[in-house]
Amino acid sequence: VLPDADLDLVADSAVNAGFGSAGERCMAISVVLAVEPVADALIQKVTERMAALRVGDGTRGTDMGPLITGAHRDKVAGYVDVAAADGAEVVVDGRGIEVDGDPNGFWVGPTLVDKVPTTSTVYTEEIFGPVLSVVRVSGYEEGLELINSGQFGNGTAIFTNDGGAARRFQREVQVGMVGVNVPIPVPVAYHSFGGWKASLFGDAKAYGPAGLDFFTREKAVTTRWLDPSHGGVDLGFPQNS
C-alpha cells in the first residue's frame, strides 16, 4: 500500500479479501505491507470496518462463518498467540468470540495484528484463517524485497494512484498473479491461474491456454506428397458410389 493510495478502497479491500470465507481460501489477503506513513490511518479504517462484521452460522444474515474444524480453529488461534509472543500488537482479537445460537461452533472472529516481525511464523507461514497481518515498511523498495524474498508467489497487489509505480511493480515483482488496486488478482478464465515458486506445482497453470494444453493429446504429422503424375493404383479402399 503506497502513500498515495485511496485508503478507503484499501480498507474495504483488506476486509473483504482478508475475512471472506473466513480467510480459508488460497487467494485470501493475509499480509498488508503498509508503506509509511499510512499504517496508522489504514489500521483505523480497517478496524472500523471490522467492528461491523457479523459472525454467525449463515442462517440469519452474517458476513463470516466458522472455520472448517475444531483443530484448525485451535491452530489459527495459536498463530495469534505466537504473534503476541513475537512482539506484534493484536489490534483486534478474534479468539474466544461468542456467537449466539452456536456456542460449540469452530469460531475465530476477524483478527488484526499490527507490527508483525518478518521473522515470525505469523508472517512466514500461511495461516489460512481470518487473521490479517500488517507489516510496516519504509518504502517501495523494502516492500518489493520482502515479497520477492519469500518462498511463496501466488498472488499480490499494489494499491496506488501512480501509474509509473504500478507498471514498475508489475515488472519487478516475482509473483504469478498481480493486481493493481484489485485485492484478489484472479484473472478471467482465459488467462492462466496460478503462482510462482512454492505456490506452483508442476510446470503448467490450472486453466487458460496452459490448462487446455494439459488436457490435450497432441499428434504431430509431417507429410510429403508425390506428384500425382506417377499414376494411380487401386489400394482396395471402398469407392463412393
Image (cartoon, rainbow, N blue to C red):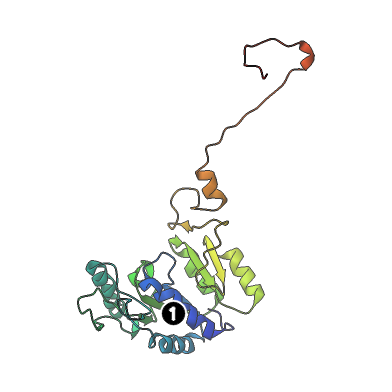
Q: Is residue 144 above or below residue 206?
A: below
Front-most of 42 and 100?
100
Q: Could you tell me which secondary element the residue under label 1 belongs to?
A: helix
On the image, the x and y values in percent for residue 161 come to: 62, 79
Front-most of 127 and 50?
50
In the image, taking residue 175 as reference, residue 19 lies left or right, namely left
On the image, the x and y values in percent for residue 199 come to: 44, 58
* Residue 63 sits in quarter: bottom left
On the image, the x and y values in percent for residue 28 come to: 42, 70
Q: Amino acid at mark 1?
A: Val
Q: Residue at x 60, y 66 (%)?
A: 170
Q: Name the residue that disc number 1 marks.
A: 15
Front-most of 72 and 87?
72
* Residue 239 sits in quarter: top right
On the image, the x and y values in percent for residue 78 come to: 26, 73
Q: Residue at x 36, y 66 (%)?
A: 126
Camera sees residue 120 = no
In the image, taking residue 66 as reference, residue 191 lies left or right, namely right
* Residue 117 sits in quarter: bottom left
